[in-house]
Amino acid sequence: MANTGRTGRRPGKSDTRAEILAQARTLFAERGYPDTSVRAIAAAAGVDAALVHRFFGTKEQLFHACLVVPFDPTAMFHEIAAHGPDETSVRLVRGFLALWDSPETGPALTGFFRRALAEPETSAASRDFSSSAAVTTAAAARALLPGASEAEAQRRLSLVLSQIFGLLTTRRLLGIEPLTSWDADDLAAAVAPAITHYLYGELPPEKENDQ
């Protein structure tokens, strides 16, 4: 007698892992981390929960996989730096805007960050991932400041990231006009001078902490 039970994979489907990831991103963004179960993700993807665990491990590991955006930060920053200081800032802003404006990565990023601000459990699930991702991104971004000391690079890059993520927050999380509907290329050109100053301009000297 033929075995008619489910094997965990839909017949004829070669991109099951990608489908699970897509459904997980959608459900995490819509419901938040606490209210999204592995079983619900499996059902949405048309597979068994066991297959989800086989591909991704725990629910938290799957959540982390959903947060990974499809780009290599090291390659991105080296490619930006290769065009020289005059184009670095606008290309940098444009790159981040593209990730958040993309129909593939934008909704998930917006949903995750909005939920993380509102739900302590979502924040806890993403904290360790965000810390390691920040270290990786900062190390990759050193390509933009090849002659800077470690302390100076950290100071300048923290200012850059504060500007960019402030922009992304107001544009995508808060939906403040005219930033929300502003053309990405024009917006990048408008913000670029501030980024250029943070990267290469003169900054106030750091004050030594009182001992």
Image (cartoon, rainbow, N blue to C red):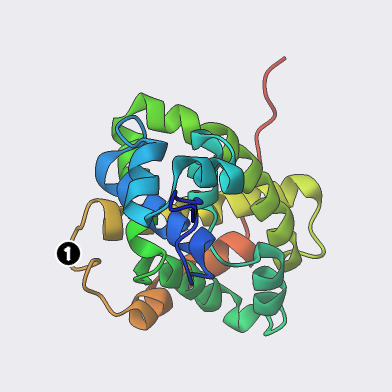
In the foreground, 45 or 58: 45
Look at the picture and state if 95 lies above or below 64.
below
Q: Could you tell me which residue is drawn at 79 percent across and 48 percent down?
A: 150
Q: Residue furthest top?
A: 211
Query: Is residue 204 visible to the viewer in this orientation of the structure?
Result: no
Q: Position of residue 55 (x, y in %)?
A: 59, 49
Q: Secondary structure at mark 1?
A: loop
Q: Could you tell me which residue is drawn at 49 percent across and 53 percent down?
A: 1
In the foreground, 95 or 15: 15
Look at the picture and state if 38 lies above or below 136.
above
In the foreground, 189 or 19: 19
Query: Is residue 82 visible to the viewer in this orientation of the structure?
Result: yes
Q: Residue furthest left?
A: 177
Type of amino acid under label 1: Glu
**Residue at label 1?**
177
Q: Quadrant of residue 185?
A: bottom left
Look at the picture and state if 135 lies above or below 122.
below
Q: Could you tell me which residue is drawn at 52 percent across and 65 percent down?
A: 195
Look at the picture and state if 60 lies above or below 150.
above
